[in-house]
Amino acid sequence: MNAHHADDVPLPTFVHWAELVPPGGTVLDVAAGGGRHARLFADRGHPVLAVDRDTAALRARPHPRIEVLTADLEYAPWPLPGRTFAAVVVANYLWRPLLPTLVASVAPGGVLLYETFAVGNERFGRPRNPDFLLREDELRDAVRDRLLVLDHGHGEVGSPPTAVRQRLCARRP
């Protein structure tokens, strides 16, 4: 029997949006955690750069198409200045000062795939701190006049509801 932890299962929105990533293009997985999204894209044939401040879980499960970079994304300079990617993928992570850099890291024709918790989630559990909860339309505002929004959502998820989340898929023309 193959046991899966919730942390191993990619977000359904990312699975759905994966076909929008230009074929063979490099994917940047930001705050990659255990690598569930890095593996999703690597298994689809993309080279992946998985970045996190704690890369022990990523390194414990190597993949030939995943490069691992240990970096502090909040209190150190951006480790990839000037680099752009076919996709920038962010799940369950919010550091507002990094948003403009993430948008700038999307290559022409590339996509930003972003999903995390939003205001209202405090009713269901963590995170509760508003510093880590997106405000209504915050992702759409972050890409305005830079990327074309292909899909966006904000609201309760689950039945019965278990969280409040915001998601965005946007392409650089």
Image (cartoon, rainbow, N blue to C red):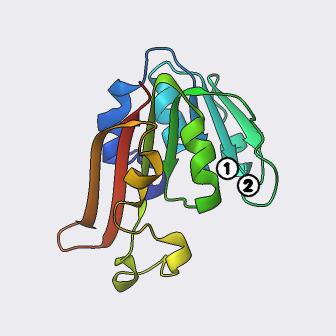
Q: Position of residue 140 (x, y in %)?
A: 38, 51
Kindly indicate whether the residue at mark 1 contacts the one at mark 2 (C-beta within 8 angstroms). Answer: yes
Q: Residue at x 38, y 45 (%)?
A: 1
Residue underneath mark 1: 57
Q: Position of residue 117 (x, y in %)?
A: 42, 66
Relative horizontal placement of residue 150, taking residue 6 as reference (left or right)? left
Q: Secondary structure at mark 2?
A: loop
Residue underneath mark 2: 54
Q: Position of residue 75 (x, y in %)?
A: 79, 60
**Cα separation between marks 2 and 1:** 8 Å
Name, please, the residue furthest toward the bottom.
Answer: 123
Question: Badge 1 local density, few (<14 within 10 Å), some, or many (20+)?
Answer: few
As rendered, which of 45 and 79 lies closer to the eye?
79
Q: Nearer the viewer, mark 2 or mark 1?
A: 2
Q: Residue at x 61, y 23 (%)?
A: 65
Q: Secondary structure at mark 1?
A: helix
Q: Amino acid at mark 1?
A: Ala
